[in-house]
Each structure stands twice: as structure tokens, then as C-alpha cells.
Amino acid sequence: MKAVDSDYDFSEVHASLDKYVEDDLLAMAAAVVLDGKAVVDFHMVGHQDREAECAIQADSIYRIYSSTKLITSCAAMMLWEEDAFRLDDPLQTYLPELGSLKVLKDGAGDASLVEPVAVEPTIRQLMSHNAGFSYGLFAESVVDPLYNEAGVSAPTSTLEDMVRKLADIPLAYQPGQRWQYSVSADVLARLIEVLSGQRFSEFLSRRIFEPLGMTDTGFHVPAEKHDRFCANYAPVNVLDPMQPGLNVVPDLLLGGYLEPKAMESGGGGLVSTIVDYTRFIQMIVGGGMLDDVRLLNSETLEMMRTNQLPQDVGVQLPNWFMPDTVFGLGFAIKTAPRPGEGNAAVGEYHWGGLAGTHSWMSPASGITGIVFTQRLPGFWHPFSHDFKRLVYQATAQ
């Protein structure tokens, strides 16, 4: 992947990423800047495997974790365009296992204190993390331990198994009442299976990856590509993100990636390269089209980056500060800029993955940033904020 000539000076962007690697805060970083669909900057630094002294390459393969969610959301909206469902259809219309859900009573300290669902959760609410589900990753309520006890996201479970397990766990809140990060994208992946009659991985391959030429994206790394798979790192001190030092960590969250597994997580299961993911994002900012391939209509993407939450409901993750943020159909949307970003950040839509794979798109400026690393946790590490701020400054936005 080569950048076209431009008048932009990205030297400070490069210097910032280089310093994070030099200071032993990141093992590697790969970053792309788009102006429209054109690649105007591509920078790589560090090692995909420091211990093996293997330098990062354009085709290095990353765990993209929750960056998977954007792909899953687009897959669902492709079916929506084909009239396979309506956004305000109840989930139980297609997933009857979810037809007898209960809801944790407000303020309950015991998961047995439940009440009936006031209004059945809809697909629109599912796609905007507003349907009542939780994740089990964060101790936000007494239902979260039940997710782990049931093995909702276990690598040995299928998406069908997962939905069946969810049917026995109370919703964390009445649908529509608040925003809570959740397994919604995994439920959406199961919905895609039911509506398409295909396994989730098959649908993604046939309808998205093959048409876009995303040859290194999937739910596992084939044997012939193992030498391109990045090591995953964690800081020596999780509580201090700026303390130097990294350790290699095993793949415990969703299981290993070197062999196929039953769970094809629509919320976090994919691996990809920065080149592949850039092609996907180019399709997004291109109004649903890349080269001669159209996956979505531009009007659909505009709706996806429009707030779907009720008034006075905003986005807030337990461990990350996200002010002035609402949520569309798969994307978080900024309603105000952060310091140093400028007004071009208003309307910016974005999301990222737990190990530091982040993408953001600015309709106001036409500028897009994509940055990949492998650091747990890495989604909201300062490196990603610095990258965005410096890109906005370099492009005078």
C-alpha cells in the first residue's frame, strides 16, 4: 500500500508513534490516513514480534477485537437493504429463543430480582447497544457474573449456543433505557446466520471479504500465515498506561487464533491486516463503494452514522471516558471535539478494538485515520488520542 503525494506534513504523526515504540509503550504501530478514499499517509514502526526480532510489515496480521463490530454492522445492513428485516422488528421475530426474556429490577442487588420486559428489544436497539444486554467483561451489574458462569462467549460455543444461553440471563435494564456495551454484535451475527441461511464466516467471506479483496481477514490465521501473526502484549503495570514495559500475553479472551473455533464472534473475533481493514474503511467513506464494488448505499451509511439512542442517553464505557458521544447503527458518533481536535471532529464516527485497532472518519473534513497495534488494553491508550489530534493538526482541520 503506497500513499499518494499530498501537501500534508505528517512528520509529527510519525514521530509520535515512533516515540511510543521507542519508550517501550507499544511494540509496533501501523497507521493510515485517508483524504477521501485516497491514502495520503502510511507509516509503520516496531516489531510484530519483538522477541523473534520480526519487524512489522504491511501484511502483518492483528487481532482486531471490537473493530469486528463495524464489519458485522455493515453485514447486517446489507441484509436490511434486501428487506430481510426491519430495524424496529423485535428480536424474537427471528430469534424465538429470546421471546421470554426477563429484566433485572432497577437497583437490584440480586440477579433473581427480575421483572417482565416492558417492550421487546428491537434490532435497532441491538445495533446501538440499547437493547438491555451486557457483556460480562465489566462488573456493571449483578447480571455480569452470569455471562461468565454460563460461558456465553466461550470459544467452544457457536453463535446459536450463545443466544440460547442469553435467553436464560436477565437483561441488565429495560430495553431503550440506557446505553451499555454488550454482546449485541454477537447476537447480530447470529441474526445474520438465521436470515442468510449461511454460517457467519461464510456470509462475511462471500459478501464482504472476497468482493473487497480482503484476503487476510477471517476468524483464524491459517498455517501458511502463522509467521505473519503479531504477538500480543500487555503493559507491566495495567494501572499506569504510561509506565514503560511490555510482556507477551496469551490469547485467553476469545481463545487462540491459530486454529478454527466454534465461536465466530461478531463482536470481536476477526483477525486482519492494516491493508485489508483500510480497504473496508475506504468502502465506508466511499459511500458503500470501492473500485467497482458496491456493498451498501450511501443513504444507508448516513443512517448508520446518525444517532439512534433516545434523547438524553449517551455512551459511557466503565473504564474509558467518552464525553459528548452518542451511538448509531454500529458506530459511536462525536457531538463535540476533544481538546486539540477542532470542529472537524464534530460528527466523527468511529470504533476500535481492545488491543489498539482504531478507526475514525470525519465527514466534515473527509479525513480518516486508522491505527493498529497489539496492546491490552489499547483502545483508549493515549497513543490513539495523540495520533488523531496530530492528524487533525497536520491536515489543518
Image: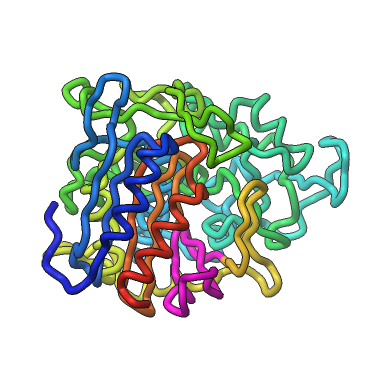
In this view, the residue in front, 10 or 161, is 10
Q: Residue at the location (31% across, 30% down)? A: 230
Q: Is residue 276 left or right of residue 361?
A: left
Image: 159 above or below 32:
above
Magenta residues, start to end: 327-350
Please report the residue visible at 54 percent of the width from the left and 45 percent of the height from the top.
95
Residue 269 visible at all: no
In reply to whether residue 336 is colored magenta, the answer given is yes
Q: Main secondary structure of the magenta part?
A: loop
Q: Position of residue 295 (x, y in %)?
A: 25, 62
Rendering quarter of residue 124: bottom right
In percent of the image, x 71 and y 46: which residue is there?
171
Q: Is residue 119 left or right of residue 69?
A: right
Q: How many marks?
A: 0
Looking at the picture, the colour scheme in use is rainbow
For the C terminus, give its image quadrant.
Answer: bottom left
Q: Is residue 322 visible?
A: yes
- Asked if 279 appears above or below 251 in the picture, the reply is below
Residue at 48% of width from left, 48% of height from top? 188
| Quarter of the rendering containing residue 32 | bottom left
